[in-house]
Amino acid sequence: MDFNDTPEEAEFRAEASAFLGQHLKPKAASAIRGREPRNKMLERAKEWQKVKAENRFAQITWPEAIGGRGGTAMQQVIWNQEESKFDAPTGPFAIGLGMCVPTVIAFGSDENKQRYVQKALHGEEIWCQLFSEPSAGSDVAGLKTKAVRDGDDWVINGQKVWTSGAHYSDYGILLVRTDPDVPKHKGLTMFIVDMKAPGVEVRPIHQASGGSEFNEVYFTDVRIPDTDRLGDPGQGWKVALVTLMNERLAVGGSPGPDWQEIMDYARDAGTLSNQAFRQKLADWYVASQGYNLTKFRTQTALSRGETPGPENSIGKIITANHLQDICNSAVEMQDHYGLIIDKDKAPADAIFQESLMWAPGLRIAGGTDEILKNIIAERVLGLPADVRVDKDKAFSEL
Amino acid sequence: MNFDFSDEQKFLRDEARKFLTAKCTTAEVREVLDDDAKSHHEDVWKQVVEMGWLGTAIPEEHGGLGLGMLELCVIAEELGRALAPIPFASSVYFFAEAVKLAGSDAQKSELLPRIADGSAIGCIAASEGPGPVEAGKLKTEFKDGTLTGTKIPVTDGDVATHAVVLAKDGSGSSLVVVALDQDGVTRSSVETIEPTRSHAEITFNGASAERLGGQGDGEALYAEILNRAAVLLAFEQVGGASVCLDMATDYAKERQAFGRPIGGNQAIKHKLAEMYVKNEVARSNSYYGAWALSTDAGELPEAAAAARVAASEAYWFASKENIQTHGGMGFTWEVDCHLFYRRAKLLAVQAGAPSVWKEKLVRALETRNAA
């Protein structure tokens, strides 16, 4: 049992760290979170992505032939760890390079790959993922947006929702129904969609937190050439599963204030001696440490060439709930003053208030707590699947 | 990065599991449970002695196998899975570790070989009444080479041959080691919620004893021993919690209600998923504790506390919800669920309750932050 890098890992870590140090500033205190205007952040993100791609630090596990490093999953983990120590604007590219573009690589034609992969890798184009719909959230395959073949094109009509970053994306991968007369999982097809095409309308959603990271996207007679289809017609569910599998490999960072930040805050506020608080603090530490250490176990498996298990499902259940709980405690600790979210007047630049308002979304995005528990129960423990009464019926008869 | 046990350690685990699955089933556990006269299972104990497990982490020069603490952690998990009704923890995690930590060369040479070969059984005696053990409140006193006072409950105190006792010593406290087969010692069994580990009340009436470690070092040494034992106990807890999850999962797949297995209901699925999450959190924290223990890392106090808090919570949750998943059958004497429920609670309070360890954890974090 050893937490140290192997000599090869240490060498790569040193190389990554030195490169990062040349190009970025170390991450500032938590207070800086969310302060940067979006336009400025996007610009910085694109520049940083370009620098990474030119130096083969973007997409470390991709083959060198398509601009990756031909590295191992473990090297990608090491890179992520080192990059997270710096003020690296990576958010806008996470979905595209982590989920969408790998799907294009797996299912696209040579022309698709030539057209899209390098531009995405070098930060010139941003991608989003269009799966969820108003009536099909957790039940993704119940979606209604339809595509009808018309000559060399497909014509799309319908609506997507909860699309992160659609408002600044150039392209998206779009899952739609092409055959309503077969059971729901069998009538789907995946496409690449130009987010600037006529008939695509993006409407930002005003979230409970006050922000607008998600969008509704409306499609009215949007034409997509058949050459931008990913996989065969009716194979969309299989393609979507590859996208979602890639989501698992993305190693997420901390979603907001953790036990250390509330402990620091409580000490400064003079409330660290409260016994009830100390007991809760211990619980938060144990859970957060438990998840971080579980990631080390995953890394050990990765470094041996094994496939990681469902650790990320555990992670979001733990971290999303604890974020909500920690922020709630911090706000209550501030008593009446805890209401204030004005950054200039609130303690700790209002990070606890901001995260409190964002936390409900984190418990839903990327799979609700309930869906993640189903995944653990069914795929890890092998318990029977939920009853699915629509499984064998044609979608049009539901 | 290698945050896992080695192939050799896993081999040891597999061998231990094979032995215990064959020779220490719940039938053996129930022999001890159902017979008030039995303090432990003698056949299982004898075979564990013969295999040398007691000396796993005792140096070869003192008659042990000279392996490390990681190997002992591996064995602890298996003993926890099997609910082994033997005084292993008392003799090895507490007594032998105390002697290794604080004993003089003479004490080590005399006691460790006898623990390793099973001719002596050790235990630790600290509690004198309800609430956490605090050195300042001790009534048991060590004076002029003799010990006077009463300790209750002492796990395995009726079967042990030797005890390490935390006692008042002048203005402070010391650890002392005392042989239990002498005139100045009277022992009686105490009924507890967990009869497969026997417990005693021990009264010392001027029993001869000698210090283990320096005068006045008792409180600090005891805390250090608890840190070490906490990691090993956490592995027993993780083992037990894993079995509870397996039992509940198997039953949920098999038991039919309303025309399908009860495990198809989300109320059951989500309960078992929560069990899984808590067990993984406990396992990962315990691995970290094992690393800290085996490397004498400065992080041991917080790693041990986190392992103990996580493992106590996981085992408690798993053992109580395992009964619940089994429904009425789970509450019968014949079904094994209650064996784990008993053991979960014993292990959770035996070396300090979770709330006490949470406080220790926060203090350790404060110390780290101040550094």
Image: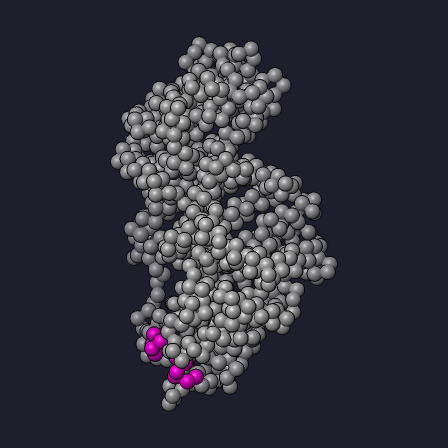
| Relative side of B193 to B27, left or right | right
Q: Tell me where residue A281 sits by quadrant.
A: top right
Q: Who's the residue at 40% across and 80% down the image?
A: A111
Position in image of residue A151 (x %, y %): 37, 90
Residue A320 visible, this orientation = no
Work out which residue is located at the far bottom of the displayed protein and give it. Answer: A151
A309 or B195, which lies in front? A309
**Which residues make up the magenta segment?**
A224-236
Work out which residue is located at the far left of the displayed protein and give it. Answer: B22
Q: Tell me where residue A204 sits by quadrant.
A: bottom right
Vertical placement of A238 versus A369: above or below?
A: below
Vertical placement of B249 versus A150: above or below?
A: above
Examine the structure image and report whether residue B191 is included in the region drawn in magenta: no
B83 or A63, which lies in front? A63
| Relative side of A266 to B361, left or right | right
Position in image of residue A237 (x %, y %): 37, 71
Position in image of residue B198 (x %, y %): 39, 25
User: Which image quarter is the N terminus of chain A in?
Assistant: top left
Q: Who's the residue at 55% across and 46% down the image?
A: A285
Q: Who's the residue at 47% across and 61% down the image?
A: A250
B1 or B344, which lies in front? B1
Q: How many marks?
A: 0
Q: Who's the residue at 50% across and 58% down the image?
A: A79
